Image (spheres, rainbow, N blue to C red):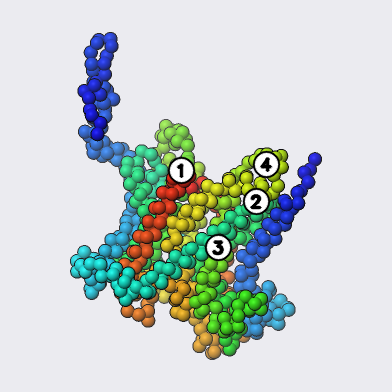
Amino acid sequence: MKRKLEISELIFKIISYTFLTIFALLCLYPFIYVISAALSSYDAITYSRVVLWPTDNGKDVVFITEAFKEMFTNDQFWTSYTNTLFLTIYGTVFSLLVAILGAYALSKKRLLFRRFFNFFLVFTMWFSAGLVPQYQNYIKTGHVFAKMGITDEKWLIVIAMGMAAMNIILLRNAFEGVPSDIEEAAIVDGATEFQVLTKVFIPMSKSTIATVTLFFAISRWNGYFWANQMISKEYSKPLQVFIKNKVAEYTDPDFLSFWTESYHPDSVVYALIVCSIIPILVIYPFIQKYFAKGTNVGGVKE
Amino acid sequence: MKKTMAGDFLIYDKSSNTYRADPEQIVRDDVEKHYWLNVVRSILKDWRLYLMLIPMILVFLFWRYFPMYELLASFKSTANMQTPVSEREFIGFSAFTKIIAGDMAPRFWRALRNTFLLSFYGLCFGFPMPIILALFFNEIKSNFLRSIYQVLTYLPKFVSTVIMTSIVTMLLKQGGLTFDDGILVKALHSMGVIGKEAVETGMLRNPDFFRSIYQISGIWEGAGYDSIVYFAAIIAISPTSYEAAQIDGAGKMAQMRYVVIPSILSTLVIMLITRIGSLLQIGYEKVILLSHETTKSTAEVVSTMAYELGGMGGEGSGASVPGIAMAAEMMNNVVGMLLVIGANTIAKKASNVSLY
């Protein structure tokens, strides 16, 4: 017999569906607006006719791709895109390598001074020196790098940024959760320390590693502040810095008064935003299933 | 201190009616005597483990601990920034007295108050939202539909701060000759949320709106993603708990009250304590990107103040006084650290769960 839905239950269901639908649409709407506005005409943006779809007079759907064309013919755009890819790929690999090795060592009970090393890590989450000392430290290392012959400032960002103690702790907790029997079995079979790590521990904590990789990659892809601060050469600047500068330039009233193109300068900004989000939108659904699991494993240590 | 007796080290042997040395104690003595030798031995045996630690230690030493050493500069003269910190002239606490009671004091206390208020409002409005979302996600029994909702609500979290603030800037921008006000400004005005003069001054340039913009965009960005942890706690509840409650005649509200809330309570307490602990650790990136010269009275937090005073903002940001900038941020971060440690201690006492 099917249980009848109680009235309180029904009301609660209706409320939750309504609320979630509204919230989800609010989360989605800015993206839809951005895409539509990127494809709309000059008049449509000037008189705020864009609501849902790309348009000219507010009714018909039109696709004006001039803004995208301008972006795609801009060399600086492609340079900054490559720079961001460079930073994301090398940066994620570097951070992940350091984090996995460190977390593996920290997860071993037989490691001497383990409490000290853990404290060394956790203390950086409690206390940060602040912006100015970090900035001066980066400048100094920049000089050291320059002396060593590394003139590309991107390498400084790759090596110096993006390491988060929380991610190492997530990995450490995941490694601690691997049953020691399996590790012992591998050692009995003659596995070396490195083989134990690559053949046992990494495959057994896949979801956490996927989550942490995602965190690293996202923070690299989205990194703005320090890249803006540390990279002085125009050809080394990543996409986020480029976008920020373009937004400032294209929303400047002086710039706007000399505008003669058939599309609105705002469309260029929107087109840029779209181009920056697309890679995340493409990868995101594939990784999305991992992180509920991955963060839950290590989020709270009991 | 415990008194040591001769008998502690000896074992009475019944068969031969004699005392002999305790073998465990011999080992213990040996370990104590050769402590460092054993340390070296163990390190040599597991040298691969220690080798693995080295990159991590170096990274944290170079980029986290060296800046802390640089902080000493706030006690020293900033006349010559090129010399190493250790060789600069010691000037004592003058930077600190300047920000606490001197000419920088009004600005510093305002920034500290803004830092605290931004986080505090975030706690009040941003904290309950993910919990509500998680409770509602639980109501949707269809997995497909729920994952659509989840994907949509997590999405803003993966957009960068630059993109997020650019979108906010575009939606809220002030109109001009060749373009209209942002669509959100128009919508809010037509709904009567904001008045005519607010539209004319521009919402992003009005200090009264900064906090609301900051909080609402924060909720938009993070609420869905933050609900993951609560939702994980809710789906871990066994269905039998609900059934038992239903048999006992519990309606929806009673089930919430007696089944769901108790099960997520420990997660909730931990998240709350973490939030309280990080009250003074506020993301400077978003504040720098969203604030404006005219909104300083509500938007300037301690780290953005240090950013400007430390001469990081580039030309036109005024005289650079790195000593004062460091001192201000150091005070903020020390208080912040005390909050984190305090919150962690309370968490440990209250629920036997340690965050770190």
Mark 4: secondary structure: helix
Badge 1 is on which residue? B352
Circle 3 residues within 10 Å: few <14, some 14–19, many ≥20: some
Q: Tell me the chain of label 2.
A: B
Residue nearest the viewer, comparing A191 with B258: B258
Q: How many numbered circles are shown?
A: 4
Q: Tell me the chain of label 1.
A: B
Residue at mark 1 to residue at mark 4: CA–CA distance? 28 Å
Badge 2 is on which residue? B138
Badge 4 is on which residue? B245
Residue at mark 2 to residue at mark 1: CA–CA distance? 27 Å
Q: Tell me the chain of label 3.
A: B
User: Dividing the picture into quarters, in which one does residue B91 lie?
Assistant: bottom left
Residue nearest the viewer, comparing B319 with A193: B319
**Residue A219 screen position, x and y as percent:** 47, 61
Circle 4 residues within 10 Å: few <14, some 14–19, many ≥20: some
Mark before the other along the chain sequence, 2 or 3: 3
Mark 3: secondary structure: helix
Badge 3 is on which residue? B125
Circle 1 residues within 10 Å: few <14, some 14–19, many ≥20: few
Q: Tell me the chain of label 4.
A: B
Residue nearest the viewer, comparing A15 with B23: A15
A298 left or right of B139?
A: left
